[in-house]
Amino acid sequence: MNLTTDRKIQWCPGCGNFGIYNALKTVLEKAIDEKRVKQENIVLVSGIGCYGYITNYYHLNSFHTIHGRVPPLLTGIKLANPELIPIGFVGDGDAFAEGMSHTIHIARRNSNAKLILHNNGVYGLTTGQFTPTSPKGFKSKSTPFGNPENPINPVTLMLVSQATFVARGFSGDIKHLQYIFDEMLKHRGFAFVEVLQPCVTFNNTYQFYKERVYKLEETDYKIGDFNLALQKSLEWGEKIPIGIFYRSELPTYEDLVLRGLDLFYDRSVPDLKDIVKEFI
Amino acid sequence: MDFSIFIGGQAGEGIKRGSMLIGKVFNRYGYHVFIMNDYGSLIRGGTDYTEIRVASREIHTSYNRFDYMFAFHRDVFEKYRGMAKENCFTLTSNDFPYDDIIKEREAEPFMKPSIVLGVLSYMLRIPENFVEGVIEDDLKKNAPKNIELFRAGYKLAEERGFNSIRLLKGDKTPKPLLYGNDAIGLGAVKGGLKVYAAYPITPSTTLLDFLAKNAEKFHIVALQLEDEIAAINLAIGSAYAGVRSMVGTSGAGLDLMGEAITLAGATETPIVILDVMRVGPSTGAPTYTEQGDVNLALNIGHGEFPRIVLAPGDVGEAFEVTALALRFAWWYQTPVIILSDKHISESARTTEIVEEDKAFLKLHPKTFSLSFSDHYPPMVKTYDKEIDGEYHRYKITPDGISPYAPPSTPDVVVHTNSTEHTEEGYSSSLPETLTKMKEKRVRKMKTIEDDFKLMRFINVFGEGSVAVVSFGSPKGAILEAMENLGIKFVQVVSLEPFPTDAVIEELKGVQKIISVEQNSFGQFADLFERKTGLRIDKRILKYDGRPFSPWALRSMFEEVLNEPNN
């Protein structure tokens, strides 16, 4: 299986998007080859940013949508046909600026969809403005005197929003990212993966992250304790944990809303003649 | 026989629910019924009222003057007493013990309308057992208490010797008594609706409630989202995945949906957007009626993309138009906006649920000879590998409509793209791509225009050298106002594409044109003049949030008729 398309990838050399793109491609190709998922059932949804063109580079169903609105689209797709596997890509602007409320609501709904955050802490496509995840004091084109805002911690936010799978990876460690994406794919419910990535042109954090990240699974960290996960999510400084912070299995939004209804295959239209009788 | 009953009180006194019960009694008793709810934007208190109009002939709107006035508080009576007809029977809390009857029987304040029903039944000598049968049917477990109240009202009216006349059982077969929003919901189901998404906003909320309550029966889901933006983006996701979806809102919510409407236009995703218009701008008067969103519906969203805007004129048309809107959205793969308003959506009338317009079906006989309950995807240009070759979401075709396939189709990759795209659906901003795709969408709009020319989408009533042109809810008042005046009435159902040729043809030989609409700018009149090149001689505009009264409109028509011809 090869999911490559004939499109020329147009990211800066060394862009963190390559790591995410390649890691997911390997994971999906393997899953299709091993017949764990059907190729035609995967649907990729992306928002707006340099990363947004990612849907052009996979030979998979896709919907390249507008800024910030990826989560409701994912839920709509899953509801319409639960056989589909919707995987969303969002940037830090999509997820926490323009589309903040959708990101929180999809998590607390536990919609059975995946969301991958390309977190580079800068608006690259518009050539270098700060984002909701940029550190305080960050000097960007729109904050020449330093970012006056406190950054959002995506992992903490998703935990308190009751996401049932919360993980963090680093685009510079593709093998580890593959492991996380594979676990994400297996999760039934809303899965959120933050990927720390450099923007080589406007915010090159490659060295910064490389020196600081460590893997949760290489420590005695146990997945499943919410309070522990919350505490762990706050660790940010000399050491930055990556790996799976939290996982739990709960009924999904689609389970609760559909209650056995099949919207895609059941095309029967009820007889209105009987229904309107009630209005007489 | 044509009379109107006023029931006034505070929010929480069951006026809306009670008027439906009373309406049902008259419907089953063989009369036409129209119910108009006038209420404020609050949950308790205020001065709300309902008009229940009952007639032996077909009626189309509220009369806005009353033969009977029942008021649970003095202030609501004082506020509206000017709308009483001569010899109007009035019964306010000053001269009738509504509250004591409730208290004595340990009933709830929201059951007060059942007392009114008792008084009315005595005064019109409608058999008690007949009325009690309707109460039982309608209120189920709440029936016994309401029957008690009904009897108390009846008995007290008898004791006080209120005047009574015998209202004979009418000869009309009872028809469904539907709110406009119920009819829109039923029409959507008829059109194959599977996903309805919304954020509560008056006066569209009752549609969300209606669909949610009946979701199981209708085999649909009706969802409340965090905002209008999420609602429409979710619906677009569902449509992309292959099921029919629709959103409902009011003007302020439509504003929020703008970016997603252009998304649907650019990605060619079928979506139906209902706007139940209310008084704007901004928060305006949320519970009152207006037709102020014509320009918004015609222009919402940046850039250029094909769209259809339909405006039903009454409850029956609301059903028909909604079912068609879903068909159009899927056939043309583009957004369709339905413009309803508070006076259609939150008023109820006895109406026939008619089969949908066959004109569109005739236009595409092959597609529509299939019963859409048995074929998937329903009534859409389905992708066929043998004819179309490799799947390209935005394949260039003569009519601008590309073959459709949902994700999950084996050997098909569906690339849907909000950025300008190649036929395959890949992002591209090359000049030739932009030109090609813009021309594709222009051709699609042309196809829609050509189809709509054949379907006409106007309704024509009466004959005369003076013509009235209008759209939407004023239809009802116009139909009643023009009776025997020798006036012709052309109602426009499709605002985009505008049925220019059909309108011009109908207005040939007409000396004077009057427009009627419910806003202050004359948005419809402007559109009409722009599209037809004809001049409107008199613009009748109303913008006080209250529906047109047929008698008031009639005297305005008479004025025009009496002007000397120049």
Image (cartoon, rainbow, N blue to C red):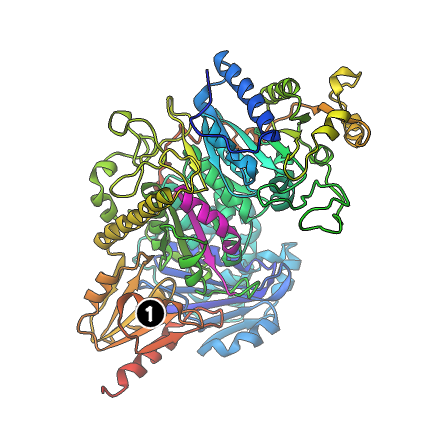
**Residue placed most toward the observer, A169 or B190:** A169
Q: Residue at x 56, y 35 (%)?
A: A51
Residue beneath the point at 32% across and 26% down: B390
Image quadrant where residue A7 sits: top left
Q: Position of residue B538 (x, y in %)?
A: 33, 78
**Residue drawn at (45%, 54%) of the image:** B302
Where residue B236 appears, x then y in whole percent?
A: 46, 40
- Looking at the rendering, the stretch of residues picked out in magenta corresponds to B254-280
Left or right of B514? Residue A89 is: right
Of residue A216 and residue B147, the one placed in the foreground of this image is A216
Q: Residue furthest top?
A: A34
In the structure shown, which secondary structural element does the residue marked by tag 1 occupy? helix
Chain of the residue under label 1:
B
Q: Answer left or right for B419 relative to B554.
A: right
How far from the left and from the top, in percent, is residue B562?
27, 85
For the residue pair A207 and A258, the one nearer the viewer reads as A207
Q: Is residue A53 visible?
A: yes
Q: Is residue A89 above or below residue A67?
A: above
Placement of B393 over or under B343, stated as above or below: above
User: Where does residue B485 sit, x and y in percent of width and height?
Assistant: 25, 76
Q: Is residue B109 above or below residue A237?
A: below
Q: Is residue B106 on the magenta stretch?
A: no
Reading the image, the residue beneath label 1 is B478
Q: State yes or no: residue B255 in magenta.
A: yes
Q: Where is B219 relative to B293, above or below?
A: above
Q: Residue furthest left?
A: B509
The number of numbered discs placed on residues in the rendered structure image is: 1
Badge 1: few (under 14), some or many (20 or more) residues near its Cα, within 10 Å?
A: many
Amino acid identity at mark 1: Ile
The reply to whether residue B151 is visible in this rendering is no
